[in-house]
Amino acid sequence: MVDELDDIFERFIHSKIFKNREKLLPDYIPDRLPHRDEQIKKLATILAPALGGSRPSNIFIYGLTGTGKTAVSRYVLGRLTKKGGDNIVYIYINCRQNDTNYRVLAELARNIGIKIPFTGLATSEVKKRVLEGLERRGKIVIVVLDEIDHLVKKSGDDVLYFLTRINEQLSNSKLSVIGITNDLKFMEFLDARVKSSLGEEELVFPPYNNKELEDILRKRAAEAFHEGALDNSVIPLCAAIAARQNGDCRLALDLLLKAAEIAERSGENVVKEEHVRLAQKEVEKNLAVDVIKTMPLHVKLVLASIYVLTKEKVKNLTTGLIYNKYVYLAKIMGIEPVTQRRISDIINELDMLGLINARVVSLGRYGRTKIIKLSVSSNSIEEGLKEDLFMLGLTELTI
DNA sequence: AATCCACAGGAAGTGCTGGGCG
DNA sequence: CGCCCAGCACTTCCTGTGGATT
């Protein structure tokens, strides 16, 4: 046992494949961002006035996942604050993690050195304190709101309204907002006033194409791997898979990392095409399984209902059908079922998570409903639901 | 052309949690 | 201590509707 462990550790330390694994992790920002020169220049141009003490325009950044929005923003702002010294601060807030008005404000407050309890205060009170805090600091503050669509869809544009108009109440400090989203239709959700002030400048990040992805991967691989650790076909394959997924660079890097880890675990010295294929499966599955595992009970039950109906070869699953199955499963487990209204929302949630595909259709005389299909493998669902269903003695129903 | 199904999905409210503040 | 606050998961009540069938 000890020897075995030692072996694992040894293999990691003296990896034949990895030179520097960290270079492939999603939060690593390289010194150079290939194929984003245009965006970097434009962003820098917009933000540069901050160095002269005036407020840069608010900026809106669009682009699909993994097109370098976050990396470019952090890169440019990092350089800017370095140059600007104490007069410029930038605050990065991810609105997926902080998806309520309160949490965004609290996070903002925390970053300018104000302690805010994570619950309990009225939002207006937090706003007041943020205002005072900013005024006291007397700086140019640039707030990056990443994945801003999550915030607005969930909690409205209240905070955005507050932030874009805050300068009217500040005399000593100035604040700019950079909003980042991968939802191209996001602007439609916004109030006209917020829209115009947030969209003072707009920046679009196009997806990377196959060649660009390959180029990025090569540069990164040179830092991350030992020479000769990759089979020739590995990088093109990773790039091609990611290019099909809207040119998602994060996915490309993730695939490369996972493939290398799989190769290493199986004791090989070279990453091959088959490892990438395995990695692709793993990435897809992990995504779904993780999501499923963390879902609340009723959501899991609804998914289980869809799963069971699918296994029973029922086609054209509708909301009503699923609801009946769900009630049946809930009763067996001795759980009080929730109403159909709620199930309707849960189905939408599952759709948003990408686990199912729900489409509103009209069946004429037979009403208006949603047609639902699973959009992940039943393998992933089994694995994600395994523990709960086993715990509740439902396994035999799902086989 | 009118009807009518089987829901969609908006609005408002409830009860609970987990925390302020004075 | 009592009261307030936000968020969450959910309910109740509701109005709206695409298009096959009558």
Image (spheres, coloured by chain):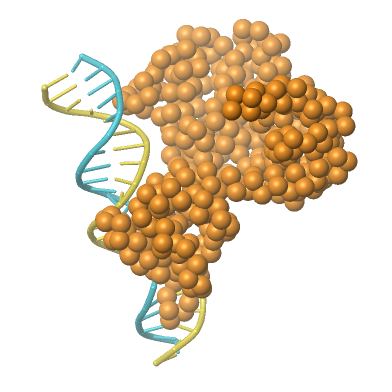
Chain colours: A orange, B cyan, C yellow
In this rendering, position of residue A14 left or right of residue A158: right
In this rendering, position of residue A310 left or right of residue A271: left
Residue beneath the point at 28% across and 61% down: A331
In this rendering, position of residue A295 left or right of residue A228: left
Which residue occupies the foreground of this view, A334 or A117? A334
Q: Is residue A340 above or below residue A200?
A: below
Image location (x, y in percent) of residue C12? 23, 58
Image location (x, y in percent) of residue C5? 29, 30
Residue A43 visible in the picture: no
Residue beneath the point at 43% across and 23% down: A106
Residue beneath the point at 50% across and 54% down: A382
Q: Is residue A350 above or below residue A306?
A: above
Q: Quadrant of residue A176?
A: top right
Position of the N terminus of chain A, as image quadrant, is top right
Which residue occupies the foreground of this view, A166 or A7? A7
**Picture mark count:** 0
Which residue occupies the foreground of this view, A268 or A364? A268
Q: Is residue A16 above or below residue A275?
A: above
Which residue occupies the foreground of this view, A95 or A179? A95
Residue A100 visible in the picture: yes
Image location (x, y in percent) of residue A158? 44, 35
Residue beneath the point at 86% across and 40% down: A231
In this rendering, position of residue A113 left or right of residue B16: right
Q: Is residue A133 above or below residue A348?
A: above
Image location (x, y in percent) of residue A347? 45, 57
